Amino acid sequence: MINFEKIDRIEKISVENQENIRIDKFLSGKFPDYSRTYFQDLITSKLILVNNKTIQKSNFVLKNGDLITINFPEDKKFDLTPQKIDFQIIDAQKDFIVINKPAGLIVHHSSKTKIAEITLVNGLLYEFQDLNKFSDKERPGIVHRIDKDTSGLLLVARSSQSHFAISKMFKDRKIHKTYLAVVHGHPSKSGKIDFSIGRHPFKRHLMSHTSYQGKPALTFYNVLEYYKDSSLVSVEIVTGRTHQIRVHFAAIGHGLLGDAHYGHKSDLISRQALHAHKVSFEYKNQKYNYEAPIPQDFQDLLTKLI
């Protein structure tokens, strides 16, 4: 059962074209940032109603026309004390910051992280006091993220105005990102991967190209180097789905080296071999192009593969 002091928000959603589906499965599909277990806990805590009546079981079967009321409890409070953290500041403009995030550092807290876990946000608040002006205290300036164990470029807004503008640029696909990845095997010299991506049907902390409620996802790649049993690829993503590159390459049989969830564990690198290498965009009629150097563990991997 969830321990909570007050309700953060209430959301209502109507059931359409989803006859005879379990409510926990339905809600985890509608709210992909939350797991099926999370909604099961809400049901146990009597925070979910159907047609204004509290339900008791997670296997409650919905019918078309049902009205679901979800009482989302207030999120747990995280430690956002500014702290000195080791990351590279690539550029600091008036409206935005470009940083090179090291692998192993989470961007911001979520419902899955520990309250005391140190994040990039702690370091950003230490380096840039103007981020304290954001109303969103847990993710100030964050407009996109990369996985904890992915290294590379991250763009951070410095004001509410630039946050809105940059977020819209991401939505309109006007920010171009290029990744480097080492994948298992030898994919075609170049290709396009366009499988939809959504929550894994059974492992709710993972994503899958077989999800029953996946969203469109598009990835382009070019092989830069073939090694004996692996390949170095340059990857451009058109969409920005969670774990997109990792899921897409696994879907075509070429999972990333070092990726324990989707790809292939490796003695040569202790995390997924994925690096956000380049980002380019136009902002206020000026073009910007940034590149993050390849980190040492990634470079060591390439040396060992030769």
Image (tube, rainbow, N blue to C red):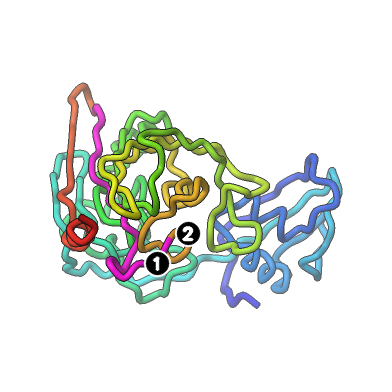
Residue 127 colored in magenta in the image: no
Query: Is residue 23 or residue 296 the one in the foreground?
Result: 296
Q: What stretch is highlighted in magenta?
A: 264-282
In three-dimensional space, the C-alpha distance between marks 2 and 1, rounded to whole angstroms, equals 9 Å
Q: Where is residue 255 in the image (x, y as percent from the top left)?
A: 43, 54
Please state if 47 lies on the left or on the right of 263 as rendered. right
Residue 91 vs 269, above or below: the answer is above
Residue that numbered label 2 is attached to: 262
Residue that appears at 28% across and 66% down: 269
Residue that appears at 37% across and 33% down: 190
Please state if 248 lies on the left or on the right of 7 as rendered. left
- Of the two numbered discs 2 and 1 in the rendering, the one whose residue sits closer to the viewer: 1
Query: Is residue 302 or residue 52 the one in the foreground?
Result: 302
Residue type, numbered disc 1: Lys
Q: Residue 265 carries which label?
A: 1
Image quarter for residue 15? top right
Please state if 243 lies on the left or on the right of 58 as rendered. left
Q: Position of residue 87 (x, y in %)?
A: 17, 60
